[in-house]
Image (tube, helix red, strand yellow):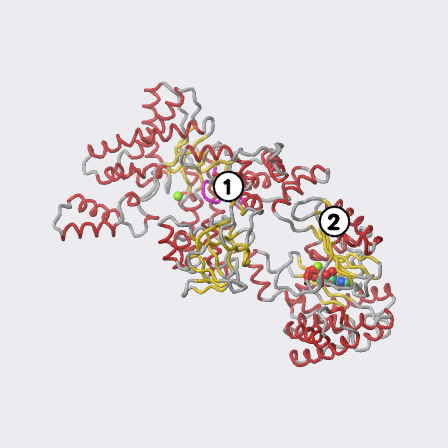
Amino acid sequence: VKFVYDFTEGNKDLKDLLGGKGANLAEMTNLGLPVPPGFTITTEACKTYLDSGEEPAALRDEVSAHLDALEARMGKKLGQADDPLLVSVRSGAKFSMPGMMDTVLNIGLSDKSVQGLAKQAGDDRFAWDSYRRLIQMFGKTVLGVDGELFEDALEAAKAAKKVTVDTELEAADLKKLVTKFKKIVKTEAGRDFPQDPREQMDLAIKAVFDSWNGDRAKLYRRQERIPHDLGTAVNVCSMVFGNLGPDSGTGVAFTRDPASGHQGVYGDYLQNAQGEDVVAGIRNTVPLADLEQIDKKSYDQLMQIMETLENHYRDLCDIEFTIERGVLWMLQTRVGKRTAGAAFRIATQLVDQGLIDEAEALTRVNGAQLAQLMFPRFDEDAKVSQVGRGIAASPGAAVGKAVFDSYTAVKWSRSGEKVILIRRETNPDDLDGMIAAEGILTSRGGKTSHAAVVARGMGKTCVCGAEELEVDTKRRRMTVPGGHVVEEGDVVSIDGSSGKVYLGEVPVVPSPVVEYFEGRMHPGADDADELVEAVHRMMAFADRKRRLRVRANADNAEDALRARRFGAQGIGLCRTEHMFLGDRRELVERLILADTDAEREESLKQLLPLQKQDFVQLFESMDGLPVTIRLLDPPLHEFLPDITELSVRVALAESRQEPHENELRLLQAVHRLHEQNPMLGLRGVRLGLVIPGLFTMQVRAIAEAAAERKAAKGDPRAEIMIPLVGTVQELEIVREEADTVIAEVEAASGAQLKLSIGTMIELPRAALTAGQIAEAAQFFSFGTNDLTQTVWGFSRDDVEASFFTAYLEKGIFGVSPFETIDKDGVGSLVKLAAKAGRETRPDLKLGVCGEHGGDPESVHFFHEVGLDYVSCSPFRIPVARLEAGRAAV
Ligand code: ADP
Ligand code: MG
Ligand code: MG
């Protein structure tokens, strides 16, 4: 194998082998752009080194050969005393990863060659500045010395000289600093700073390899599901110097605005500076446009190069460059990060420029970005006072009164107050408070902290790890930078999309993208901005491309109408249990408690017209589109009074010797129906089989509603769904009864109703016997919430708040299996059941109605396994449409 590639040998498609940085350096080199010569050590070399614990001999030889070639080309040797070749050693994995080693610049400088560099450049200051930078970076990243020690020493040198910026330090000062730095290395690392240039280079290369297995890098990979065996590449690049005086400098640039997507000149430039100085903020940078005045020739050349890169990559690129005494050098490029809004705009702009087609445009955006654009946002024109910033853990804009404990959060929210729960960090005891709050703010913890995970699961706004905020829960207050104290009851605003924290109430405005989906803003109209226009067009691209249909989970006409506006092609899940609450609860109670058939039939008779009316409205709002109605699913006791409350009532009545026969009877019933594990108890089809007449009443209501709509010249398309089936026998019994009822209604109304009957697949047994079940089912709808619970043996209500954060932190999964479908486990069952079902019944309709139906990654999976549709909450529909389109590209 070949372990080392010259920049002239690689290209941008070799990211696996050369890492992102190396592949793009090679690409630029081959485009004829001015890249300082160098070579890339492959990820394969890294893997071999990590596996065996030492550098393979072949690698050493290859590096030597490439170094020789580089030296020959540059006409000087690495670290040569009178005129040293210097290089940078830069890490560069396929994905950029926090926790990996940074770059070391100026390798090759030593006590001797620093003199040679000074002479060659005719600039002492420059040489000593470069040397102190080398010792600093090398000490920190290769030898593991605490970087602050160097920074403190640098600060001290500036203070001693009474200057504020590093450029004001002169050669003599820097020389002294070098001595100081070397001492720090000796004390802290227990060895001298290596004077041999090749040793410097080899140690730096090894350090990059080793950093692949650093703790932080490993954790990051586990969470992001990046394989551990990719390894990192190492780039060795001859140095160019931006710190050679005012006609030198270094900068970063974007080929277009990463916030708006507009074309133009975007970036920052810093004269007389090296490497990270621009982003480190040590001196004030100037806008890139100013470079035109500073160095017109380099500026024009850079503009030209940016155009070349954009046309070549057909996307926004970001760039690092350096100017050495008026000569421009390109040091890095990659397809640049951008905001969610810019992603949509740029994709459509590139289509208009003819650089990409519609299908490719779809690969340039994603559902998470669209979801982000749909959250309400704080009014950017409002006067705000920002007091902190944490991690944007769960998007949204939340305003409320500060509370510092869960109890108060619940109490205040019950009395109608909006509250923000502020904690140092949250734990399972805070759950009630988190549910009650508008948003959650913590001063500790990252994206996988308890607060972040639970908030995301609930779709609640959350900012976590806002470390500048001092939260004192005992005294119910929080101190913000500057000393201002936020007391319990003071209003705060938090932005879960940016992580910003504000004092007072920041006004919230609905997102223009939602206004568009709601039909209150029209693309092409004056009030529509470019973003809406771009989203509109991308949705059209997705709709043209996708095979999956998208339906909504909606229980009433209002949700159904919104879902239609958002583009739903039917209802995939109408839960009938919500129709049994409110005023009707009493009827249901009587049904459950009925002692005689007559009593039971009476309650059913009363429920029938109410149910029917629900369905008539639903069919009307979804006229012409399929509506899947799930028969009653939850455990019965959910419709009965709380057991503790009722016990107290009975006990009170008893002690007061008041009549309480009804309460007693109710209590007995509640006891009788009480279950230890209601999730695995009397629910779903089991209810239908145990309570005579319940399911047939629901079927009759559906059939009569459909008949009524038909009579009114409507086009109802009802599908009856039986929940929690584990075996085909259950389904057969229900079907037989249902068919009889439907035939009766058809005979009475004279209408052909064409109702179809199917089942949910949400138990492992159902999935495993799907071939048999399909004999009695016209469609399957995968209930992936319950299926996830039953396949993993997790009770969702319990585990998310208790141990999921520990699991996420340990990297057991990167994301909750309730958020994104677990392809290997739950997904395998879906695949298996879909296949077996279709073998029995080739025209079996397949859909999914769990939360996963609106999750981007899961949508791709459902596309791949050949489902016909996904169903999700109305708000997620645009995301599902977009992702279904992307899945089909
Ligand atoms: P990162 O991945 O953190 O951006 P880089 O390897 O790009 O690390 O290097 C850090 C900084 O050093 C960047 O500003 C880069 O442009 C600069 N740099 C890297 N190699 C050289 C070089 N050979 N000559 C001059 N500057 C360099
Ligand atoms: Mg860089
Ligand atoms: Mg279920």
Say which residue label 2 marks: 265
Q: Amino acid at mark 2?
A: Val
The residue shown at (75%, 56%) is: 25
Residue 76 can be seen in this image: yes
Q: Which residues are magenta?
A: 847-862
Where disc 1 sits, the SS reads helix
Q: Amino acid at mark 1?
A: Arg
- Nearest to the observer: residue 64 or residue 516: 516
Rendered location of residue 848, percent (x, y): 47, 40
Point out the tag, 1 or 2, that comes first from the N-terminus: 2
For residue 354, the mark is none
Disc 1: CA contacts within 10 A as few (<14), some (14-19) or many (>=20): many
Q: How many marks?
A: 2
Say which residue label 1 marks: 876
Drawn side of residue 484 relative to residue 708, left or right: right
Where disc 2 sits, the SS reads strand
- Nearest to the observer: residue 621 or residue 709: 621
The residue shown at (71%, 61%) is: 284
Rendered location of residue 214, percent (x, y): 60, 66
Is 564 rendered above or below residue 298?
A: above
- Nearest to the observer: residue 332 or residue 382: 382
Drawn side of residue 439 relative to residue 525, left or right: left
Rendered location of residue 882, percent (x, y): 57, 39
Residue 43 can be seen in this image: no
